[in-house]
Amino acid sequence: MLITDIKGLVGLHPKDKLVLRGNELNDLPILENAWLLIEDGLIKDFGEMGNLPSSTAHPYYSAEGRYVFPSWCDSHTHIVFAASREEEFAMKIQGKSYEEIAAAGGGILNSANKLQKASEDELFQFAALRLKQMILQGTGAVEIKSGYGLTADSEIKMLRVIHRLKDQFPIPIKATFLAAHAYPAAFKDNHQGYIDLIINEMLPQIASEKLADYIDVFCEKGFFSVAETDQILKAGAKYGLKPKIHANQLSVSGAIEVAVRNGAISVDHLEESNEETIETLRNTDTIVTLLPSCSFYLGIPFADARGFIQAELPVALATDYNPGSTPSGNMNFVVSLACIKMKMFPEQAINAATLNGAAAMELSRDYGSIAVGKKANLLITKPMPSIAYLPYSFGESQVDQVILNGEFYNG
């Protein structure tokens, strides 16, 4: 496929540039009035229209007035769940906190109860519909977590659903084992008993079936302590599962320190942070993944994106799509919120949602930017006056076409 008359080809980072740190996020290379050639699902070549190859047998698509972006790379989602939780929506409006809703039987345990009753086929069908909508909104790589099972059978069931999604969908999908999302009611007063179940029963089966790439823990007051998190991460490492941490969502909890000690690929959330948080992350390879639509929905503080960028840290953006705190998988809205609420510049937010999102899934060698040899996972916008128009026009989608592996995707 040859795409011609592109108003702007966005994100032309060198192929060996795998992550952007700090002020590097300011640089979003754009080639104006461009063409892009795709062969065998890969980016073959690109250039200015004045240098368009004189003869080609490829079918072509004119993108006049439109921008071509690398697909969004969403590195934090929970899209395998059995049912929505709009019954908790009114509780939020009444002013109930995340902790109060959980204490009243809502929250993660509510989703776990519903998921345990659902079949694997039902969960797959629900998740496939959500994923299809995410792709049509421009997402071309995704990470999906378990964590609504909270029993050995149900956690394995969730991971098998994610494995089926990997087989059925034309985008890379990373799977994360998150049984340490909350304590089941049966283990409310026996934390070590549940941790032993994770370590001695779940992890061996997950490893034998190769069902997960990462291990995650919700390290937070009222959930998993720093010591418990450390124990679970070390056990996962023995089975080759790299850590990704839910950190500092509700408080500065010590999660960042335990994540860095265990070599976490990313620390996610960080709505609460301080100078010690930044100093702990400085000079590490751990990516700071921010989830502004979670802050928007819960009414909690937005993460200090500018502080992290000024500290020369690598910042990524993701949706946190889940039924309780972020019932949306729209990365376009995430980019808008990053600009509006976290004061990121459009260039920073787009880089964080593409190349750095890919890096948070260890996919940036093949995804997240426009470079010869990378996968042709792209989105084509509607006609727009500038790239800033995409986050500016937060209430409407600017995605016109989606290309995956060099082919148009229509769901």
Image: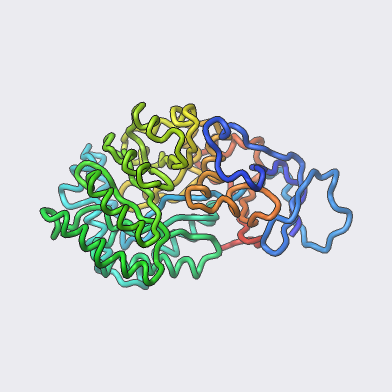
Q: Nearer the viewer, residue 31 or 255?
A: 255
Q: Is residue 171 left or right of residue 193?
A: right
Confirm whether residue 334 shows in the render: no
Q: Quadrant of the C terminus?
A: bottom right
Q: Quadrant of the N terminus?
A: bottom right
Residue 370 coordinates in the image, percent (x, y): 66, 48
Quarter holding residue 57: bottom right
The colour scheme applied to this rendered structure is: rainbow
Q: Residue at x 24, y 51 (%)?
A: 107
Which residue ends up furthest to the left in the rendered image? 189
Q: Residue at x 43, y 68 (%)?
A: 163
Which residue ends up furthest to the right in the rendered image? 54
Residue 60 coordinates in the image, percent (x, y): 77, 58
Confirm whether residue 86 shows in the render: yes
Q: Nearer the viewer, residue 99 or 264?
A: 264
Q: Nearer the viewer, residue 241 or 138?
A: 241
Q: Is residue 5 left or right of residue 218?
A: right
Total tally of numbered discs in the picture: 0
Residue 115 coordinates in the image, percent (x, y): 28, 64
Residue 222 coordinates in the image, percent (x, y): 19, 44
Against 303, is 186 above or below?
below
